Amino acid sequence: MHGDRVLVQCMVAALLLVAVVEGTNGPIICNIALNKLGQCRSAVTGKYPPPPTNECCSLIKHANLTCLCEFKDALPALKIQPSRAFALPKKCKSNQRVPPQCKP
Ligand SMILES: *[C@@H]1O[C@H](CO)[C@@H](O)[C@H](O)[C@H]1NC(C)=O
């Protein structure tokens, strides 16, 4: 009986570990799940981007902007315009602090 319970706990722990490592959300950078970035896609591309969606804003509000700022030069590779990306916190009415070197 006792042994079974330990086994089950072990299996649950193993599953959780896999879930964290593999992540149902895929890779995560700066607290942003990359596969959710699509929700911000339209707000950070193009010449006249529409306002960010609520989904995008909730993503942004959880993002680590200090960390994201370090990826500034890599963002264009993800088809993200840094100036638009770092304008999002304000557009989302978030009071997050954008690092000075990344201020739009
Ligand atoms: C955000 O990222 C920076 C740089 O990667 C790190 O030093 C800092 O601890 C992070 N802050 C939070 C709240 O995770």
Image (cartoon, rainbow, N blue to C red):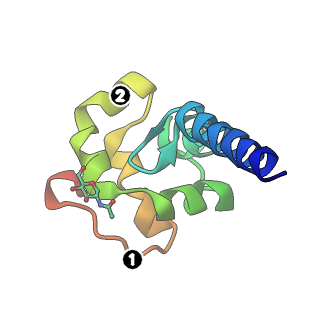
Q: Is residue 87 visible?
A: yes
**Disc 2 to disc 1: CB gap under 8 Å:** no
Q: Is residue 62 above or below residue 47?
A: below
Q: Quadrant of residue 42?
A: top right
Q: Is residue 104 visible?
A: no
Q: Is residue 96 above or below residue 103?
A: below
The numbered mark, 2 or 1, whose residue comes first in the sequence reads 2
x, y (%) of residue 79? Answer: 45, 27
Say what amino acid the circle numbered 1 marks.
Asn
**Residue at screen point 71% across, 39% down:** 11
Of 37 and 28, nearer the camera is 28
Of 35 and 97, nearer the camera is 35
- State the mark number for residue 19: none
Q: Residue furthest top?
A: 77
Report the Cα–Cα distance between label 2 and label 1. Answer: 25 Å
x, y (%) of residue 49? Answer: 54, 45
Q: Is mark 1 within 8 Å of ligand 1?
A: no
For ligand 1, which image quadrant applies?
bottom left
Q: Residues within 10 Å of mark 2 (few under 14, many from 20)?
A: few
**Residue at screen point 39% across, 77% down:** 95
x, y (%) of residue 34? Answer: 53, 36
Q: Residues within 10 Å of mark 1 (few under 14, many from 20)?
A: few
**Residue at screen point 40% across, 48% down:** 85
Say what amino acid the circle numbered 2 marks.
Pro
Q: Which residue is mark 1?
A: 95
Q: Is residue 90 above or below residue 28?
A: below
Q: Which residue is mark 2?
A: 76
Quarter holding the C terminus is bottom left
* SS assignment at label 1: loop
